[in-house]
Each structure stands twice: as structure tokens, then as C-alpha cells.
Image (cartoon, rainbow, N blue to C red):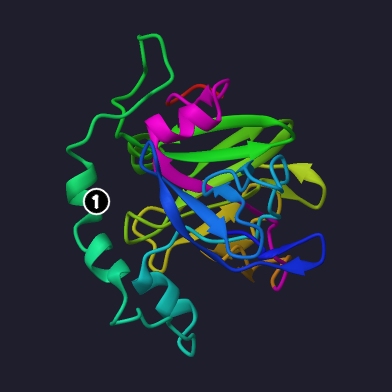
Amino acid sequence: MWEATVEGRKLNFHLAGINNQNFIMEDEETGTWWQQVTGEAILGPLKGRRLVSVFHDELTFGVWKQEQPRGRVLRPDEGSAWREFSENWEEETARLPVVTGADGGEPFPPRATVVGLSLNGVAKAYPLTAIEKQSPIVDSVGGVPVVIILGEDKKSVRAFEASVEGERTEFFVRPGASPLTLTDAKTGSVWDFTGRAVAGPLAGRELKKVPVLKDYWFDWKIYNPRTLVYTIGAQ
């Protein structure tokens, strides 16, 4: 998700094409082409500029609706050709070959789902299968301690800085607890899936959110060629 304003000028974007199954957007004001996944202008008058990212969550609609009961939902344009184009997008593209940008020996199949984090110039990929087995994962990326947690729906993923009162700390989930909560080892405070402390000495505080991108391995690797890869038990 990106801000639509570049150097103080609001731009309007539409789909211009697909590059290795990643959208290319064109702004109507200058005709510049922008890469969806990086926000970089790759062709046209604004080539080399980058859009400013907007924090977003990787959630299912069910989790979002539960957290935002009064939230509004964008209605698709029923008369748009986009509806027909996107109806079977995942099914159709799953049959197509992809470019991995690798020389063999890949740790995952091209379409394995990973959760990618990028902090202080360091990128790291966490296979969703590892998060399913080990959630929460406490790790460090670019010198920043992080905790990654899988929602109760086993699909939604969030990450936070694993720091309480300025110090790195471990987090754990109580087995069978519902709703899903984290407990930090430093103060014993209990944190919900939004990152807010709901009980304990730090009740009312919030963990700092860390942006994540749930992506196919092949796509993450192309745009993060030097990415690190998380393996269970290794930090």
C-alpha cells in the first residue's frame, strides 16, 4: 500500500500490465509506470522515484471485521472489466511459470508462502509453515528484535518489535488460550493480537508494529535477492 502523492502532487493510478505476476501501475498525470511490490517508478518521467509506503495489515476479512466492526468496505465497480479479469486470478496464474532470479538450490518451492520483513536494509523471509509450527517467533532483523505471531484463523499474521520498556524480551502464547494473547517474559503483561496490553503492569500500552508482506517466495526473492531465510530453531 502506497501514498498516492509524489512531491506534493496527487496522482491517479490504474493497472498497466503484469511483470512476472506482479502488477505494473501507470499514473494518469505523467504516464510513469510503477512497480506494485516496491513502489518504484521504473519507466517514464518520474523514473527512479519511490512511493511512500503506508502501513497495512496482513489479515483475513473475518479478523479485520472483528477488530473494526464499524469499518467500511470498498465495493467493487460492477461495470468494470477488472472484475472479470480478477475473478480467477490465483487459479489461472498458478499454472504459469515464474522467474525466480536464482541459480538453483532454493530452500522453498517458487509458490511457497513466506512472510517477509525488511528493517534497516536487511530483508528476511519466514516460511508460513514455520510460523504455523512455532508461533510466536522471536527473532532479530536488521538489529531490531521482532516477534511474529499467527492469528487464531491460522492465516492472519502480524509482527511487532519484541521490546518492552526498552529491552528485548521473549514472548509466549498460553496453549489453548482464547482469545489468542501474548505474554511477555519481562513484566508478565498480556498483549492481544493488535499488540495492545490488556492485562498486567503495562496494561494500555502498545507494541510497535512492524510491516510484513505475505508473498510467494519467488516474488519476495526477486525484489530482495540478498534476503535471509528463517529456519525453525535458528535465530
In this rendering, position of residue 46 left or right of residue 61:
right
- What x and y, as percent, mark residue 108? 33, 24
Q: Residue at x 70, y 73 (%)?
A: 204
Name the residue carrying label 1: 90
Magenta stretch: residue 27 in it?
A: no
- What x and y, as percent, mark residue 70? 48, 90
Give the structural element (helix, strand or loop) at label 1: helix
Amino acid on which the number 1 mark rests in the picture: Glu
Q: Nearer the viewer, residue 68 or 100?
A: 100
Instruction: Read off the magenta span.
Output: 204-231
Does residue 145 appear in this view?
yes
Q: Is residue 90 above or below residue 178?
A: above
Magenta stretch: residue 209 in it?
A: yes
In this rendering, position of residue 228 left or right of residue 115:
right
| Mark 1 residue crowding within 10 angstroms, few (<14) / some (14–19) / many (20+) | few
Q: Residue at x 61, y 48 (%)?
A: 39
Q: Residue at x 35, y 9 (%)?
A: 104
Does residue 170 appear in this view?
no
Q: Residue 111, located in which quarter of the rendered image? A: top left
